[in-house]
Amino acid sequence: MLRPLLGVGMLVAALLALAGPGWGHGDELRDQPPPAKADFEPPAPGTYTLHPIMRAPSGSVVDLKGRSRRLAEFTTGKITLLSFVYTRCSDAWGCPLAYRVFDAVGAAVERSSTLRSRVRLVTLSFDPRHDTPEVMRQYAGEQASRGVDWQFLTTRSERSLLPLLAGFGQDVRTGGNGRSDETSPLTHMLKVFLIDPRGVVREIYSTAYLYPEVVLADIETLRLASASRQDARSGRAAEARVRRPSP
Amino acid sequence: MTSPARLLCASRLWLVALLAVLVSTWTPPALADETCNSPYMGNLIKAQEDYVYVWTLGVKGLGDGWDKLVTIDATPDSPRYGKVIHKVSVGGRGEAHHMGFTDDRRFLWAGGLDDSKIFVFDVGADPAKPKLVKRITDMPKKTGYVGPHTFYALPGRMLVQGLSNSKDKGGVTGMALYSNKGDLITTYAMPTTDGGDGYGYDIAINPQKNVLLTSSFTGRNNYMMELGKLVANPEAMKHFGNTMVVWDLKAMKPQKVLAVPGAPLEIRWSLKDGDNWAITASALTSKLWLVKPDASGQWQAKEVATIGDPAKIPLPVDISIRNDGTGLWVNTFMDGKTRYFDLTNPEQPRQTYEKVTGKQVNMISQSWDGSRVYISSSLLANWDKAGADNEQFVRAFKWDGKELTPVFEVDFTKEKLGRAHHMKFGSKAMKAAYRDAPLASAR
């Protein structure tokens, strides 16, 4: 049991080693240093449990081409890392940190044959009045067209946004002028949601615990759990076939 | 590891010896203040706090007699400075005790040690007027734990430390993890092997080290017992916690049990960058303990100071650390004293100040900059002092580094509120941007 887990841990370490700051993106965040490393060795993937926290909410979003889409298209079917941001955010420990962590995680995922097709990143704006699809396209930069599945989304209006904020439990506050118009600063607590392929939130990170190596270990933990369930299902099916009498 | 079994045995003998001295009261603890909040909580109030929320035990025949959340105006230039501006009764009396904010500070969870109910107040929509938005009444049924004590925010979740269990009401207990919406996610039993006594009390996390620390107190059989009966019962007095536990936070697995005799209570991590230590006070032995890794990286607990004269049972019940880790307030219930320890060298804390701040004092909360200090009076309904010594108040002081100077007081008996217990700060700035947003994360 221990040996394969150590192997997975080494895989995560190797993936991180490959994820350097040179993995480019198309805006000013490109030149910022990579996120800090954790000051501890994360437990090996698969040695701990990520309990179901809540179901990701449903609702309507808008993609970079301005098309209305169901959020569920982006929170199911793959292991998903989702963060709310607003592009005007200048707090280094807020949205820019989320971008850089996603950048590092995305680079590692893109280079992994086992994760590349199983992981999705989602950056969702909570500032629909300012963050139009065009603004989000600029924010995405080159990421929107790279190999890793990184989606940049916004909403049509606050009416569409509110159920998503409430469903995820994401706070948004005015920056002090009491208004919430297109120019007023917004503050929020950075939260990044790790969602399993069934659309269930399995981990939530905030700034104090948002390290790429921890996120990658959690992604690997979910992948191992999913593979284990599939193995169990395959085993049961094979057993049923064996027991089935020959024609 | 030091042999916890040996220490436990020794401490039991010690506790029995204490019976002769414990003729008046001993008290359970409290936790408070801006510097003790979860590291996952955003929006720390680093300027002037506008409100002090006080989780208050109801007293039969006093006002409506129910537990309630009381809001005091703490804005110095407000015409209602130092006055009660709002109160929310919860419709019952269940031994209101502690509370804690959610990670986004929009909601305040508060618990009752007797009825094991959890109340969730919305303090984000209108911080001046908290609103009760949810009750969780099935914690014992769903978890097997009773006495929700510490409420410690994780991202999107609330970790709740129980004090006891629903089977034998003893001290063996565990933690319950809830989503911010109030749904139970899972439970974690306190360790009962490798030296663990299974008891719980406080929770404190150092995310940079992936470490969660827990401490230990006593079960419902004891904390709901009339104090005179408790101290006269040698068997009951054996049932106090003598351990702390170091957990792997990510895996939520116990890593090491530390022997800390005498009911180690509040835990405070130093918040100074680069520091890697926590401090706690043991109530029964009146000691400060330092928890930090040794040269080989192994977590150890070490006794580093004495609080008052342990022979006189001062009973340290709450501590409050400065934001730079250089000083520590300690409240001792029995002598009503508020003490300040210089923590410049955490290996050798040194008391530099003391003042009698009440006939009984329990919790102490300091502002982020340390210039304002708030003190409350009540421990538990059955353990508070009687007669004229049963003062019930919140007192506010200014601290200039040399002297605590009173600035206001709310008399909770005169105001017909009850017993003032846990305090948390509020701010006018904590309002949601989208006013029509259904702040549903806890509804």
Image (cartoon, rainbow, N blue to C red):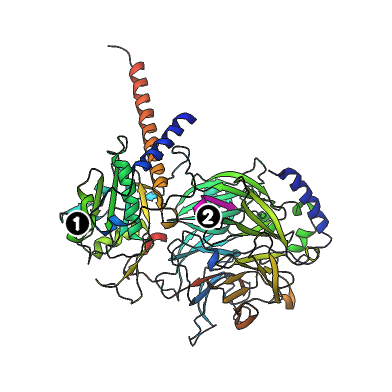
Q: Quadrant of the C terminus of chain B?
A: bottom left
Q: Residues within 10 Å of mark 1 (few under 14, many from 20)?
A: some
Residue B424 in the image, given as x and y percentages of width and height? 53, 69
Q: Is residue A168 visible?
A: yes
Query: What span is in magenta?
Result: B205-213
How many marks overall? 2
Q: Residues within 10 Å of mark 2 (few under 14, many from 20)?
A: many
Name the kind of residue labelled 1 in the image. Arg
Give whichever of A201, A191 is nearer the camera: A191
Which residue is the site of mark 2?
B206
Quadrant containing the N terminus of chain B in the rendered view: top right
Which residue is painted at 24% across and 71% down in the image? A182
Picture residue at 62% right of the left edge, 74% below the top: B375
Q: Secondary structure at mark 2?
A: strand
Q: Is residue B359 left or right of residue A7?
A: right
Residue B209 on the magenta span = yes
Out of B368 and B7, give the one closest to the viewer.
B368
Q: Chain of mark 1?
A: A
Residue B226 at x, y = what percent? 73, 62
Hey, which residue is sitting farthest bottom in the picture?
B79
Q: Chain of mark 2?
A: B
Distance in Å between CA atoms under marks 1 and 2 = 38 Å
Q: Which residue was labeled with disc 1?
A: A137
- Relative to residue B10, is residue B406 depicted above or below? below
Q: Is residue A104 left or right of residue B1?
A: left
The magenta stretch spans residue A114:
no
Q: Are marks 1 and 2 in contact (CB under 8 Å)?
A: no
Front residue of this view, candidates B80 and A37: A37
Give the residue type that dot 2 points to.
Asn
Q: Is residue A56 visible?
A: no
Which residue lies at the image location 46% right of the left edge and 41% below the top edge? A49
